Each structure stands twice: as structure tokens, then as C-alpha cells.
Image (cartoon, coloured by chain):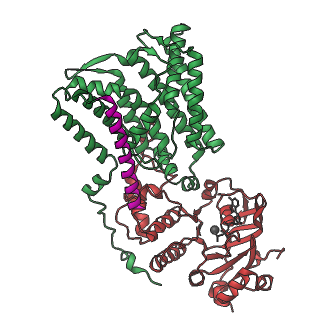
Amino acid sequence: MSSTQTVSPPGAPPTKTGPSLVGRVLTTPTVGPLIFLVLAIAFFSIKSSAFLTGGNLSLIVQQVMVVGTLAIGQTLIILTAGIDLSNGAVMALGQIVIAKLAVDSGLNPILAILLGLAATTAFGLANGSLVTGLRLPPFIVTLGTLNIAFALTHIYSNDQSITVSSSTLTFFGKTFPLGGTDVTYGSVFMIALYVLAWYVLKYTASGRHVYAVGNNPEAARLTGINTRKLLLTVYATAGLIYGIASLLSIARTNVGDPNAGQTDNLDSITAVVLGGTSLFGGRGSVIGTLIGALIVGVIRSGLQIVGVESIYQVLITGILVILAVALDQLSRRRTA
Amino acid sequence: MTSSRDSTAAPKPVLQARDLVKRYGSVTAIDGADFDLLEGEILAVIGDNGAGKSSLIKALSGAVIPDSGEILVNGSPVTFHSPIDARKYGIETVYQDLAVAPALDIAENLFLGRELRRGGPLGSVFRLLDRKRMVDESREHMANLKIGIKSMKQAVETLSGGQRQGVAVARSAAFARNVVILDEPTAALGVKETGMVLDLIRQVRDRGLAIILISHNMPNVFEVADRVHIHRLGKRAAVIRPHEFSMNDAVAIMTGAMVGEHIEGAPEVPAAADSPRA
Ligand SMILES: Nc1ncnc2c1ncn2[C@@H]1O[C@H](COP(=O)(O)OP(=O)(O)OP(=O)(O)O)[C@@H](O)[C@H]1O
Ligand SMILES: [Mg+2]
């Protein structure tokens, strides 16, 4: 039973040529979304001269700031083959905690922020504990915590918005000039979070383990990865990121609004999917999610500038989501 | 009828189990099983579906914690709480259902769970992986086993079944210092790819490691194994040498048509392997 036909002759160095550069670029999951984003920007720039201006681009980034930040946590969870329906509600709760404590209770704003972050992180930990401890499906767990966070938000706030004026709480809404355009600190902070998440996911062992767990949880466990601890860390980190989104939301609107973020859970999933990350877990990238969030922002702003009714923006986003998932499915079938 | 192996000093047992029991609710997957693996040998483990082969090797590799019984490495009792514990004793396992992460590339799969980090603050503070070293070492391991795969940066899902299994075997072989356990590594493979994996197994054995090979493929088992452990109803029914028994005998013992005790006392079973219970 010789099998020399499939092995290289002894002593022959293995050839180094992998997939070609072009091949590798084309199979990188973020390339499709990126091309689409560039085309969308080009399209609207041709349609209207008001689109491709520094001011408008800065506005688009501001508009996607909160959902874009939530989508980082959503990406982490989806990469582990989970899903988080609670993030918008948890973000709203974080906002109310921060605003209530800082404005109504007169707490030091920094302390209020820390307690808000603690609240959203606790929700993330609760999601993670229920998923890993009781082995409940993430969809159901986060549907439950979505409702709990929503109810707590409304009970605690008495259904009232809280206007915020503290310059600490609104810092991320302030702007600085960059190349003739005013850019908010919040936009820069969101991008920085993306870069950090990208680095951790791509270049550290923990990041690669996130992919492994989403890809083949049993294999990950058998290689000695502590999969429970990893999942718990992912959900808690997502919770912390939602708290940052709370702060960005307050800074952008100057209020703690109990009704904020009600569609943000689905919007963040939309960004993840448009960015080429697979809902089955284990494949995708957080940079894709940023591109996905920007695609939604660009289409929304572009159609608005061109004068299309806003309901068509929703229609087009819906079609894009289905297209993106269909493409993911097709490419999976091809490689399976 | 003594083989050349027996004429030298008797080979030492490297991995043993005594009276292992593992229950899942009302199912007793391991029912007082004994087990002996000798240095430098390929020991095949055969048995019907559900006989408890996978459960046994999961206990031997730390993936499952037995309810009772004893595991010995090089003659000393050990307790495994996880696959990492077994690994510390140089025991590496390729589990039944292709334990790879298909979307990750070859180098990432080889080093999964024991990634190499850069030296200095880049590694200790920024946790930066040493991708280059992992890719280079992967290429070396794969070349040592003569697995002809070009790029270590290729996702495992783009490989053929045999190549994937090659990656799984290479991972175990690269890190094992003592024992490599393979649970049905050729189950999903064609003839050519099976041949490739069997060749790999021999190469690993020739590098001095002891190998446990679980397989349902009798011709394969009889081709590569030095000894065959026959498992039946959660315990060892017999251990035979392939050149002294026919495949039909092995199947008969496996199914209970031939009584195991009958064979147990055969000279090819080393003294240490004789369990008082059988
Ligand atoms: N995690 C588990 N939970 C419950 N029962 C289990 C579990 N693992 C194994 N079993 C049961 O233990 C018995 C032995 O299973 P095991 O997988 O060890 O058999 P096997 O000899 O490897 O079979 P096969 O040849 O089909 O791989 C079976 O009855 C099986 O259903
Ligand atoms: Mg089995």
C-alpha cells in the first residue's frame, strides 16, 4: 500500500506557492463589501455634488456611530456562532443609568459612566453565563434579556428622557477640525475601537480562539481551549462595548432617552451581515462590519440627498441583507 | 512462535488502564476495561459500533473523566482532568470527528491551543502572535511527514479529506512525545487517501512513538498493527497478534461468537496485560 503519488519525494523542499495574491484578495470576505461601498459612494457622488463632501462624510460616520459600536460587540458574538438581540436595549439602559446618576443623583460624571459601563457589562455577563452555564440558545437568552433591559430602562427612568449638559458626558459629541471638516471625537473613538478589535481578533491567540470556537466548538475544546471562559469573556466584552455605545449615544443627542436603540439590535446584525461575517460563526471580520455599517449609512444619506423617501432606504437595506446572506451561503456551499 | 520483537528485552508499557468505568446515565460506555499500550508499537483497537472504543480513548486522553479505575503512564498512576493534562504526559489525540477548525488555516490548526507569541513586550504586553514562526514550523512538520501541501496559509476546508486528516495527524505527531491516539482516522477516506494516512502512521511509529489506532477496517488493521486489542461490551475481550489470527477470528471475538478468555492467555499478550478479571 504505497501512496507515494500524493506525497512529494523525500528531500524535495515543499513548494512555497500558496494561493495567488489575486486569488487571496478575492476570497477575503471583506473585499466584496468594500467594493460595494466604493461603488455606492461613487454612484451617489455622481448623482449629487452634495454627497461627497467632508461635512457629509463626517455626518455619515456620526450617524452610524452608535450602531457601529454596538456592531463590534455583535460581531464578536456572531463569530462564536451566537447572536445578540439585547444590545440595543442594553445600550438604552446604560444611557439611562449614566444620565440618571449624573443628572438626577448628582454623581460625579466619571463615576456615573463607570457605573453605566458596569451595568451593561453585567448584562453581557448574564447573557454569557446563561449561554455557557445553562447551555441555552443565545437567541432565546438575549430575547429574554432584551425585554428585561427594556423594562428596567422604563421603570428606572419613569419613561422620562433626561437632558444632559455635563461637558464630560457630551465630550464624544464635540468636534475637532480635520482637513477642513469637523470630526467628532466619538467617530474617532469608534474607529479606534474597530482597530483594537481587529488587532485582537487577528493577531492574538484569544482572537483566533474566538474563530475556532465559532467554527468547531468541540474541536476547540479538545485542543484544550477553555471554551466556556472564552464565551463568557466574549459576552462580557460585548456588554462593555455596549456601555461605550451608551456614552456615544448620550454625547450625540445630549439626552438619556429610554426609547433609544429600539431597532439597533437588528441594525447591528445588518451591519455584521453586510460586512461578510457568517451568521454560522467562525468566519468574517470586524473591519467588514465597519464597512457594513458604513454601507447602511451611505445608502441612507445618499438616498436622502437624492430625494428618495426614507422608506425606500429601509427597503433597499432589506434587499441587501438577503443578498449578503445568500452570497455567504453560496460561498459556504462551494467550499463545503 | 516468537517474533523478533519479543526476543529482545520485553517492551515496556507506556500507557495502561485498569478497571476503568464510565457511565452515561443508564448506559455504561466503559465497563471495567483494561488496556495496555507498549512502547514503539501500533496497537489497533477494534470493536462493534457502540462497544466503547471512543469512550475508552477519551478517558485515556483526558477528554472524559472516568467514574473509577486507574490510568498509568510509564507505570505510574496519573489523573487527567482535561486533554491538556494528557498532553503534559506527551499524549496527543486525533479525535473521531475530524478535530480541526475548517475555516482556520493549516498553521493555525497545527498550533491551535498552543500558539507561539513574539518575544519581548510585543508578545507579553500586546499578545502578538509569532505568525511567521508558526508557519515555518508547520511547514517543517508537514515536510517531515512528507505531506505534500504547498501553503500553510491555506484554509483547512480547501484541502481534500486525506490532506485534512494529514493535518490532524501532523498536529498530534508534531507535539506528541509519548503516544499518538487516532480514532478512526481513515473512516471517511478513499483507498488512496487511506494509504497515505496509514503511511503517516507508520512514519510516526518509526520515529519512536507508540500509537493507538481505532479502526473498523480489518484489512487496514491487519496491515499496520503490531497488536490488536479487541473491545466488546465496554471492556477488553482479547489482545491478539495479527499474523497469528485470521480476520474472521477477530470478528468472531468482536461479536461474541468466539469467547475472548480463550485467547487471553495466549503468549503474545505480555504478562502486564493479563488482567485478573478476565
Ligand atoms: N457523551 C455521551 N453521552 C451519552 N452516551 C454516550 C456518550 N458517549 C458515548 N455514549 C454511549 O456509550 C456507548 C459507547 O460509545 P462509543 O462512542 O465509545 O462507542 P464506539 O465503540 O466508539 O462506537 P463507534 O464504532 O460507533 O465509534 C454508546 O452506547 C454510546 O451511545
Ligand atoms: Mg467511536
> Residue farthest to the right?
B277
Most frequent secondary structure within the magenta stretch: helix
Q: Colour of chain B?
A: red
Quadrant of the displayed image that contains ligand 1:
bottom right
Q: Residue at x 84, y 74 (%)?
A: B276
State which region is magenta: A309-336
Q: Position of residue A172 (x, y in %)?
A: 38, 19
* Residue A302 seen in the figure: yes
Q: Position of residue B199 (x, y in %)?
A: 49, 77
Q: Position of residue A245 (x, y in %)?
A: 44, 26
Asked if residue B168 is positioned above or below residue A298 in the image, the reply reads below
> Residue farthest to the bottom?
B1
Q: Residue at x 35, y 43 (%)?
A: A319
Picture quadrant of residue B143:
bottom left
Picture quadrant of residue B80:
bottom right
Q: Colour of chain A?
A: green
- Residue A322 located within the stretch drawn in magenta: yes
Q: Position of residue A179 (x, y in %)?
A: 20, 23
Q: Nearer the viewer, residue A178 or A74?
A: A74
On the picture, is A143 further left or further right than A73?
right
